[in-house]
Amino acid sequence: MEEVLGEYPPPPVEGAGLDLGPSLREICAANRSDEKQQIKALLQSVGSSFCPNFSDWFGVESGDSHSKNADRSVVSKFLQAHPSDFSTTKLQEMIRLMRERRLPAAFKCYHNFHKIGSVSVDNLFYKLVIHVHSDSAFRRYQKEMRYKPGLWPLYRGFFVDINLFKANKERAAEIAKNNNIDGNVNDRAKDGLADDDANLMIKLKFLTYKLRTFLIRNGLSTLFKDGPSAYKAYYLRQMKIWGTSAGKQQELSKMLDEWAVYIRRKCGKKQLSSSIYLTEAESFLEQYASRSPENQVLIGSAGSFVRAEDFMAIIEGGRDKEGDLEMDKEVVSPSPLSSFMETVQKDKGLIVFFPGIPGCAKSALCKELLNAPGGLGDDRPVHSLMGDLIKGKYWQKIADERRKKPYSVILADKNAPNEEVWRQIEGMCRSTQATAVPVIPDSEGTDSNPFSLDALAVFMFRVLQRVNHPGNLDKSSPNAGFVLLMFYHLYDGKNRTEFESELIERFGSLVKMPLLRPDRSSLPDPVRLILEEGINLYRLHTNAHGRLESTKGSYGKEWVKWEKQLREVLIGSAEHLNSIQVPFESAVKQVSEQLQNIIKGEYTPPSTEMRKLGTIIFAAVSLPATEISSLLDKLVENNPKVKSFLKDKDMEHNLKKAHLTLAHKRSHGVTAVASYGHLLHQKVPVELTALLFTDEMAALEAEVGSVDGEKVIPKNEWPHVTLWTGEKIAAKEANRLPQLLLEGKAIRIDINPPIIISGELEFY
């Protein structure tokens, strides 16, 4: 090829010698101080044919009758308006749900100056920007998608053009007829995103973007303030949240460690600004990518070195386009036991802290642990600092104590309810060479809170039993119930599994303090109703007044009435509330044993079932390997072809992962995968009807049965269980077996009579 190119050089590219002027980055850098000027400079550089008039972008600046920001009522008007097409219907459905569920998101409207020539009283144009603030919104929205499979998927940000117009009767009738909106929901809603709507929602988040934004830019402050080790802890936690494989974590860690050394050496102690970080990062990434094709794949296109064509050629060679850019491998992850044992060393201290709520018995627990004979099982001294007795910044005081007594065990007797406090504790561990262990009250939780109403009732009951409490939160406190609700809502947005998983991810361990008897009777209706009334009142109060005390807002009278009723109801239910609690002595004993195991290094983190929307790739029925193995043994006995085919195959390894895929995110979409959510962990019967195989692959043809009378319908055209594929053959290639059979290139062995095996429906 080189000789041919030498003899026949390609013609010069048209326009190759033209001066294209300054680059995008150079223009932005030269006008960084003013966003409006920056936009103007960019528009001027591309010429008047693209933007002949700045009013399209900025409005008529002198005497402008339109302000940039539109009235907040636009969103409400949009939701009340009659939708003119299916896409608008789906968008309204999404926004209504987000507002009804109070998801942490902003809805901002701007006048659309691109349409300024078409604006009239009856024809208005806006740009709506939807920005999701918190990750908790995605978790809560995902649950809604499981119950409403037709919902559009939720991403971090949306940019929507809105046209509000008044239609005459004839046009309104025509719109309704064309879109079938007045009648039953049209068939397109069944699959959420119809073919002609799918491209309206574009997810702009790739590994290369995540690398630059989350791992490099967002880690700058940690890197320059707390150093490389803190930065490493930051990016490893971020990758763990994404579900990044062990192999990919290792590759990224090598690159990010090198980046940390490079940028600190170049900038010294002066932190690199996040507004100009990309100029430095791209220079480093370009140099890093030039070393090997593997590095090119890792970071994507950087600078002018990596060509997009080369990158896509590597990606299309069977690699994952969105997550780990690696062929599927079975990676043996380090055991939680061994990794945690490395962190618990004799020459380091321990911080025991409490992500709880007043009334969770942390002070009483600390007192028992402090006075326990022999401490916590080793020779390290135990100290306790009660938050209600400390003046000034409590966690700074803990840090000071850590430096004075670096080998001790400190019991941080103060509620540590949110991520801001957890980050302080993480920083304290790094700076003072300590290990932190969270101790939490054991509770089932609700859909959006790690603590159940039963637990909240017990906490309130305990607080209202106190007398002369050092923090003045006792029976004499007029707003004790409000304070408890305030703490309760600090955990809002996380269910129990998410709460525990995050603590384990951050600190590597978790101690559960028994609270409620598992065989308890249900909460009495009066108690449940008074708590629900208080939660509703708290939301009304905070929506109107934010963090203002209950006695000072417009709901003052309602709070006084509720506080009185709360005391009456809890006192009236005292027998029940006392009976459902685990004896305190038993709880102390179990906590002490768990802490001693951690100190000795004899600890395995409890398993969690945390599942984030971003890490769910497909829905499938997982099948037991032993039953499939028995089926294959019978086929081998009765058919020489099967025996010959299986004789040299390592089926035992492959059968461990046997499953029937119902829907895959890339092939069928997020909504299709989420539609099976209501059947999660349910037993699903699968009828196996035939074995199909070639020299390169084998699969069982299958038909999925019903759960409680509901037929489970796979999205795959050919439902099957992949048994084996040859080297370098992707598992998805098994989908081709029916076609290969028609072409005479595959063998089919019927299973007569068919065999039914039950498996569990799971998300992967």
Image (cartoon, rainbow, N blue to C red):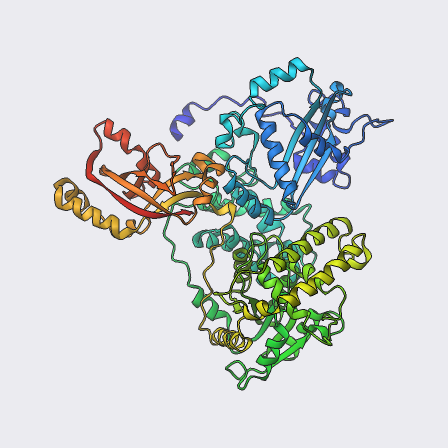
Residue 355 visible? The answer is no
Residue sitting at the far top: 170
- Image location (x, y in percent) of residue 35: 75, 38
- Image location (x, y in percent) of residue 461: 64, 68
**Considering only vertical position in the picture, is 465 above or below 274?**
below
Q: In screen coordinates, is 84 left or right of 55?
A: left
Q: Nearer the viewer, residue 44 or 481?
A: 481
Tell me the residue at 77%/60% (across/down). Answer: 560
Tell me the residue at 26%/53% (across/down). Answer: 626
Tell me the residue at 71%/21% (across/down). Answer: 165
Q: Nearer the viewer, residue 181 or 701?
A: 181
- Residue 584 picture quarter: bottom right
Q: In screen coordinates, is 138 left or right of 630?
A: right
| Total numbered badges shown on the rendered structure | 0
Tell me the residue at 56%/45% (across/down). Answer: 210
- Image location (x, y in percent) of residue 365: 59, 76
Q: Nearer the viewer, residue 28 or 69?
A: 69
Q: Nearer the viewer, residue 638 or 579?
A: 579
Residue sitting at the far right: 63
**Considering only vertical position in the picture, is 318 above or below 452?**
above
Residue 728 visible? The answer is yes
